[in-house]
Amino acid sequence: MTKQPGKQRVLVIGPTGMLGKPVAQQLKADGFNVRLLARDPNKARRLLGDGYEIIQGDVEDAAALRSALSGVDGVHISLKGGPSAADFDRMDHLATRNIALAASEQGVGRVTLLSAYAVSAEKADTPESWSKFKGEAALKASGVPYTIFRASWFMESLPLFVQGKSMSLIGKQVHPLHWIAAEDYARMVSKSYQTEAALNKELYIFGPQAYTMKAAMQTYCDIAAPDVKISPISTKMLSVMGTLTFNTEWKSMAVLMTHYENWGEDGSPDEADRLLGAPKVPLREWCARNRG
Ligand SMILES: NC(=O)c1ccc[n+]([C@@H]2O[C@H](COP(=O)([O-])OP(=O)(O)OC[C@H]3O[C@@H](n4cnc5c(N)ncnc54)[C@H](OP(=O)(O)O)[C@@H]3O)[C@@H](O)[C@H]2O)c1
């Protein structure tokens, strides 16, 4: 039997992140007792406000992790690795594995993990996708009940491609993608804590409509940032520029976008939509709410 939200304490790891924060907020709004593991508690307080229990610590500090896990019913992982291959391995794989093992040892009821679509042995063609694949596998092997959210591209990523008046369209991104609003995803994560049926599943989290990356960027520019123009750049050119300027972020981005040139969405969102309620926020509405 799943406990009522008010009786469940959920730890969010990565609560100051773009995608961890809305989950922490939604869990709190739904009545859960929410604990945050934050490297910088002041930052967490500034971003999230009052009403959270905050444990200061780094996820790689075993003692901090043990104390953050003590007495919780669930843990949500929203970490980000990179840009180096070693950093992807440290966060997406090893940190996930260590959290899952510690959670299993401490008898935590469930671990939920933000992953991505196109994470499989066949598609593990980049340090990030390989690390995410190993992290997912370690979570499943740990014995703790889990839910893995294999999300599509978040609408919140769109502004991250803007620099000044230019929005970089990197590579030939031909695949249709179901862009998802973080608020829809956060509602689905919170709902997963309210149903046993979401346990031990990989759920595909896809937004209500499909747009290619170029079409999504054009929609964003038209509605939210009319002064911004799309600037296409090939993955090869970005990689060369990254090498010449010693910019590891650009090199890593070129690798990431080559992965997404190769692989479109896989899996079906039907089970997630049925169990957790289908995402509702259309891209145009999200853009209108995020002008400027
Ligand atoms: N963008 C998309 O469309 C998309 C789609 C699917 C999946 N994802 C995945 O979503 C995940 C989260 O992305 P995001 O954009 O939310 O990342 P983010 O904004 O960089 O957030 C990462 C979070 O992890 C925390 N963190 C990092 N290292 C830590 C450590 N050693 N100990 C404790 N906390 C640590 C950060 O805390 P600090 O504040 O201390 O830095 C921050 O709260 C990524 O793995 C990404 O690949 C993204």
Image (tube, rainbow, N blue to C red):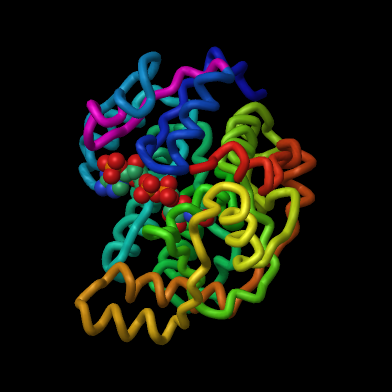
Q: Which of 153 and 162 is in front in this view?
A: 162
Residue 225 in sight here? yes
Residue 189 at x, y percent in the picture:
59, 36
**Quadrant of the rendering where the N terminus is positioned:** top right
- Residue 2, picture quadrant: top right
Residue at x 51% of width, y 64% of height: 229
Q: Nearer the viewer, residue 236 or 31?
A: 236
Q: Is residue 218 magenta?
A: no
- Residue 187, picture quadrant: top right
89 to the left or right of 6: left
Residue 74 at x, y percent in the picture:
48, 31
Q: Is residue 35 magenta?
A: yes
Magenta segment boundaries in residue numbering: 31-44
203 to the left or right of 123: right
Residue 168 at x, y percent in the picture:
46, 68
Residue 139 in sight here? no
